[in-house]
Every structure is written in C-alpha cells, then in structure tokens.
Image (spheres, coloured by chain):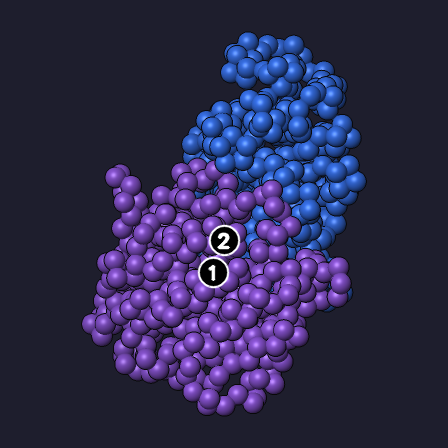
Chain colours: A purple, B blue
Amino acid sequence: MSGHFRANLALVGFGNVARRFAVLLEDRRELLMREYDLDCRIVGVATRRHGGEFDPHGVDVAEFDGKRSNTGGRPSLAFDIIERLGRSDADFRVVVETTTLDITAGEPAIAHVRAGVAAGCHVITANKGPVAFAYATLRDEADAAGVSFLFEGAVMDGIPIFNLVRETLPGVTLRGFRGVVNSTTNHILTALERGEPFDAALERMQSEGIAEADASLDIDGWDGAAKAAALANVLLDARLSPHAVRRIGIHKSDGARARQALASGKRLKLVASAVRDRNGSVSATVEPIELPTSDILASLDGKANALVLQTDLLGELAICQLEGNLTHTAYALLSDLVTIRRRQAQPAAPARRIL
Amino acid sequence: MSGHFRANLALVGFGNVARRFAVLLEDRRELLMREYDLDCRIVGVATRRHGGEFDPHGVDVAEFDGKRSNTGGRPSLAFDIIERLGRSDADFRVVVETTTLDITAGEPAIAHVRAGVAAGCHVITANKGPVAFAYATLRDEADAAGVSFLFEGAVMDGIPIFNLVRETLPGVTLRGFRGVVNSTTNHILTALERGEPFDAALERMQSEGIAEADASLDIDGWDGAAKAAALANVLLDARLSPHAVRRIGIHKSDGARARQALASGKRLKLVASAVRDRNGSVSATVEPIELPTSDILASLDGKANALVLQTDLLGELAICQLEGNLTHTAYALLSDLVTIRRRQAQPAAPARRIL
C-alpha cells in the first residue's frame, strides 16, 4: 500500500454507470497500481433515494448496494459526503459524479461539481449537464482551486474526444464539428429506413434497453443539444447552454423522409454540429439531415456514433465509436482518474487548455 | 530568447516533407513559444544529393534550398551533421528524419535514427521504415539513452494514431486493428468502381500528384505492408518486418471485382490488418476485401484513410483522416516535437509504453 499514490473516491449518484465503474475499478486495480502507481479507494457513496455511506477506511460498494433501503431523499446527503471526502486523508480526493441529466438547468450535478471543487476535491463526471450548462465557470473554479474537472464520458462514452484534442492535437485550432452522437435516434432512423413504423421502432428500442422509458430527451433532440453545447463549450470556447442550441428532433413523419433519402442514395441522420463564425461567436444545431453515402456520418448504423472535427492544420478528422455500452462510460471515468494521476505527477506540465 | 527551452534541430532528408515542416515551424513559432515555451532552431540540413549545411547559429532553410547544388552524394554527410548536432548547445537536440522509404531494409533511415540516439539526440521521423523494420530495437536504444524516438507521421500523416493510444487510452489493451491506409490504391479502387480502366486511373493519379511516378510500392501493397508492420510493432508489441506481412496488392483484374462488389452493395477496399492470436503471436495482412457498406471502412472515398482499433474495454473505435496533404505530415513532426517538450517538462511522467 505505502509508496502508492492513494486516491479517495466518493460516488455521487449510484446508478448503473457508478456501479459498473466500481466493478471496473476493482477489475483494473492491479493495472492502476502497476502502470500508474495509483491506489484508489471508494470511501463514500451518495444515492438520491437510498441514503448513503461514508467510511474513510473504504465502503464495500457491493454490500452497500445490497443493503441500501428507502431512507428517503435528504438532498444535503451528497454535500455532506463530499465535505467528508474533502477532509479525508489521501494523496488526492475525487468526486465521481454520475447523477442523471437534468435538461432544465443541469442541477444538482453542477452544485455537486462546485461542492467538490470547494472541498479541494477533483471532480470527474459522466453527466453532460455541468459541461453543457456551466463549463467555463466550473473550469475556472477548478483552476483557481488547483484541482481537475474532467468529463471524458459526457459525450461519447469512453471514446476519447476531449483527451484527443487536449493531448494529441497540439497547435491545432478547431473551427467546428459535426457528429452523430445519440444512439437511440440513430437506431430509430435506421429502423425507419427498413420500413418499421416510428412507434414500433421506439418501443423495440425501449424493450431492448437502448432507449429510456421516457425517450423524449433523445427523440426531441435534447440529448444531442446537451452534447453539442458541451462540445462547443470545451472545444470552441463557447458559452452555450442546451437551450441555446437550434434543435429539431425526429418525428413520425421522418419515416417517409428516411426511406426517401435511402432511395435516392442518401441517409437521414440526426446531426449535432457547431461552428465558429467570422465574428468569433459560436452557433450550434441539432437537426435531421440527408447525408450522401460518401459522408462518413452516413455509414453509422444504429449503435455507432462519430464526431468529425474541423481543424485548421489537419482538415477534417473523425473519431468513431462503433459500439457503446455501460462499460465504455465507466471506462471514461477510469481514464479521467488516470489523467488526474498524470497531472499530479507532472506539476510542470499544465494540460493545454482547449480553445 | 532566454527563458525558453531551446531545441536544436537537424533535417536529415530534405524533400517535400522537410521543406513543408520548416515552413510550418516558422509559421507556428509564436504558438510554440507561447503554449510550450519552446524555441526551435534548425541548425543542420543534410540532403542525399545536394550536400548539406551545419551552423550552430541556425541555417536559413529557404536560402539553403535556393543555393544548394549538386555537390554529390557523400553518404557520411548525414552522420557528420547528426554528430555535430549532438555536440551543439541547446536544451535538447532533435534529428528530423524524412528520407524516403526503402522497402528492402529500411535504410539508411534506421542508421540515421541510431546515429541520432547514439549522439544523445531525440529522433522524430515521418519515414515508416525504422518503425516497420526495427521498432523494438530502436525504442530500447532510445530508452537506454534517455531520448525519445517518435514517428506520429509514419502511418496516417498528422492524424494521431500512436498518441491516441499512448495518451488517451490508459488501461486499454489492443487486440488488433484493420484499416484503409494507402491513398493511391483507395483512389484507384474508387475510380475502378466508376468504370475507369486501371491504367488510366493510375496515370491520372500520377498526373494529379497523388501517386508516385513509380507507384509499385502502393499498387503492390508494400506501403500498406510497411504501415501494417509499423502499427503491429508499436500497438501490438510485434516483431514484424514488412516482408513478414501477408501481402496482396491490386491488379487490373480488380476493375471487374470492384464493379461487381458495388453492384452487390459492397465496396472493394485494400485493407491492412493485424491480430494477436491466442498464442500471443501477431500476424498481419494487406489484401483487397469486399466490405459491406455498413463497414466504416467502406465509406472512405479516395483520399480518406481510417484505422479501426479492436480493444478489450472499448470494443471497436476508429480514427479517420478525411483528407491528406503535405502539411498534415509536416504537422505530425511538429506534434512529435511538442511530445518531446512535454516529456522534458515531466520527468516524473514516463509515457505509457504501448502494448
């Protein structure tokens, strides 16, 4: 144990992503120690409706999962646990925020991030709310506190987007992006092409667990708008919220449109995009577009996602997620942990601020 | 000037890539100083047939380019200049190797890399020979000498492949890859689909400057084999040479095959791939394959390249270069320079060895 960098973690939000993250963290324990000299311990768990637990010696997450009960929704619980995390003894402390997206204002996730930073903790999140609604503010607060605020899983699960730009494209300026970033709508549009009715396709996605019971966030383009805002805020230094994104979702009438597109050698895709205009202001859009099959976004069936980056030095490049699952999102949190560890080891090496 | 990290550079090989690199370096001088505190000076140039120059106070590359003459091919010139670079005064010294690929044994590029390392210089190269023929040896020699051997531009110009795996996928194990990595053959196959005869398509590529006058390295799959070996050696810890890659190029008879594939909803692509089998040994292949249009590699027209990585934690992900030009390759060298600078600043942060 001694000799390793010890990180104390608190899980704020305890849904599927947090649970899978806890399993992955255990699974890769040896690797994290061997390659990154990093020893992680989950010391806190805060749920929305099932209470929480804090133990500086470590919380047994599986055991907590089994015994948790309806102890009710004390809203201050998460903040209590974050505060105790901040006072706990370790080389560094990390809030792992995985509450679900609130599309009205990104809360309480933003408050969790802020509380973590204020308590001197690093914050990593798979929730796109904080980045989509308040990136610049949270980044500045984290900078001032000397901690990291990371969110690799917020947009394309574990596929590196933010790290790609931050770590591998030095000196490159981004001008815009466009992507297919919502799997539910991409699945539905693919089904519509095959002639499946909209409602039947949606129901099938729900029964297969691909779409949520309430799929309106996906269908109406809100998920895409939140991702577009998040990407624009980080990659293009915008100050957007999801509500500032021009947004057209998909509708029943898109069945005919999707089949018509296919018949004319095109494919209908829900495209999220943003561009910086000559005045420097950034506008973002989510809308269904007929794409020629020569467009890389047109080749993406169902579960595949992709983001095309428009750059000054490298023209267009794309990164594609050919499949997606819970482990990918959990992995994004793991990669954020490693980023924090690397920064700890590299005081002389501030990460390039993405602009 | 003072206060910046000063890097002395010697250009070994002075073709189009090296010239473009010199222009890009000048163009981004301010940015490198501002963002990376890095002040680069080209102090040496070695050409194959037009002599060379060394000046510790800096060589005016444009001027050298204008006045160079047929002073003949003294083979030791490059090594003399590398040795003088090694003795020159700077915070660090970098050999910029851009000689052309020799498919028989990767020379003299490998000897240049070795000489650079032996002289205590970092070495960056856009030549795939050294990585394709001798990666493990050169990496170990560089490690032992405490210098970096980097080659981001060797496979997909400036699109980050090696940095993607090294910097953004911590804890992920690669199982294999497959990609479309040769533009000339991809252009020709696309032309064949349209019914253009093989020879006419090849001639057009040559007249448009896309293919070399001697296009046999491309057509016969040697370029793809060298890239497959390079990727396998670095990403899968293989010990391949291009000659160990199973290799099938494209031929006149592929015209009918390409049109037939298209008629049946597929596309004929020259695919480079490698996979690690259960015994741990890695086999690599270059061959034309009919791909279904749902395959992301099938969507790549002409100038586009892409690499699909097969991983344990993230399933398949792909990175795509949607266009390519000389500036991209020059940029890869610039990004390698920044990687060296970052490593200088981060003594506590050894780059993850890619396995």
Left/right placement of residue B298 relative to residue A37 reads left
**Going from the N terminus, do you reach mark 2 or mark 1 first?**
1
Circle 2 — which element?
A: helix
Chain ID of residue with mark 1: A
Q: Are marks 2 and 1 in contact (CB under 8 Å)?
A: yes
Q: Quadrant of the C terminus of chain B?
A: bottom right
Q: Is residue B159 above or below residue B318?
A: above
Q: What's under tag 2, amino acid-wise?
A: Ala
x, y percentage for residue B26?
49, 24
- Quadrant of the rendered structure where residue A19 is? bottom right
Disc assigned to residue A145: 2
Disc assigned to residue A118: 1
Circle 1 — which element?
A: helix
Chain ID of residue with mark 2: A
x, y percentage for residue A274?
31, 51
Q: Quadrant of the N terminus of chain B?
A: top right
x, y percentage for residue B12?
64, 25
Q: Is residue A18 above or below residue B275?
A: below
